[in-house]
Image: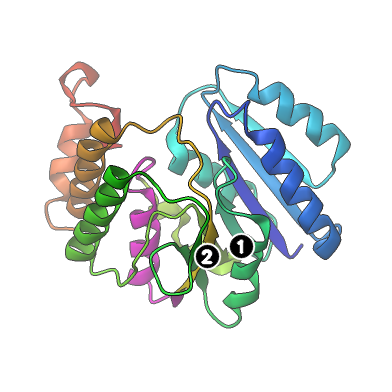
Amino acid sequence: MKLSIVIPAYNEEKRIAKTLSDYLSFFDKRYKKNYEIIVVLNGCRDNTLSIVSRIAKKNKSIRYISINEAIGKGGAIIEGFRLAKGNLIGFVDADGATFPNAFNDLIYSIKDFDGVIASRWIKGAKILYRQPFLKRIGSRGFNFLSRAFFNLNFNDTQCGAKLFTLNLVKDIIDELSITRWAFDINLLYSAKRKGYNIIEIPTHWNAVSASHFNLFKAMPEMFLGLIRLRLIYSPFRFIVKAYDRLPRKLQLNYYLR
């Protein structure tokens, strides 16, 4: 199989049907039976499962798994990676912000590289509707810290459209331990440490309504996630191990995972 597309989904009953319909329509024409879409539902408390199940019954290209616990976007992607059968394995958000043709650009661009990520912040990117000003500020601040902490030479680590070779995914999957805001940094930094070559290309993107995003809650969570990841890849890893052994009531919150 050529391609696996992982879609993490958390309470996406209002958007998942359109996203799947758009991706099925696009990739059926180009890849026929040579691709799969893996929807990983995590902690859904709405009607997402029944919608995905109904669509999967009519489309053999769709596989899905439902996890009762909310394991975060990164945790869902990791589970999807483990199920993927494609030679190229990528992921995209369930909200439809990345158009199918924009994801196909990743496939076209990967060539001899080990991975390719979509970027909203480099020349050539087409943004249909921009994020609110404060969210853009938060995004730029997170990118600055990611560069400072991990020396990642990317302008947009957080865009929800990325594609990698099967070899890269197999090689780093056991190193992926961050499941929330810093997951993409964990993935990209693990790949960098092993010498994989990843490029960044401009994308066509639409800032849809982020029903699960609260900027003022997310910012400290994002920062603490970076701190945790930096400690993991340092001589001070023992601090993280000691923290994880604390009773849950003494830990700051799940977002440090």
Vertical arrangement, residue 194 with respect to residue 35, above or below: below
- Please give the range of residues in magenta: 178-198
- Rendered image: mark on residue 193: none
Which quadrant holds residue 21? top right
Q: Position of residue 46 (x, y in %)?
A: 59, 17
| Mark 2: few/some/many CA within 10 Å (<14, 14-19, 20+) | many
In the image, residue 179 lies in the stretch drawn in magenta: yes
Vertical arrangement, residue 56 with respect to residue 127, above or below: above
Vertical arrangement, residue 125 with respect to residue 212, above or below: below
Which quadrant holds residue 248? top left
Q: Is residue 41 left or right of residue 219?
A: right
Q: Is residue 145 left or right of residue 28?
A: left
Say what amino acid the circle numbered 2 marks: Thr
Which quarter of the image is occupied by the C terminus?
A: top left
Residue at position x 48%, y 73% in the image: 124
Which quarter of the image is occupied by the N terminus?
A: bottom right
Q: Which is nearer the eye, 16 or 253?
A: 16
Residue at position x 21%, y 29% in the image: 245
- Rendered image: mark on residue 203: 2
Q: Position of residue 141 (x, y in %)?
A: 21, 54
Q: In this rendering, does residue 233 appear at all?
A: no
Q: Position of residue 181 (x, y in %)?
A: 34, 43
SS class of the residue under badge 2? loop
**Residue on which disc 1 sits:** 102
Q: Earlier in the sequence, mark 1 or mark 2?
A: 1
How far is the residue under mark 1 from the one under mark 2? 6 Å
SS class of the residue under badge 1? helix
Vertical arrangement, residue 123 with respect to residue 72, above or below: below
Cβ–Cβ under 8 Å for marks 1 and 2: yes
Q: Position of residue 159 (x, y in %)?
A: 44, 55
Say what amino acid the circle numbered 1 marks: Ala
In the image, residue 132 lies in the stretch drawn in magenta: no
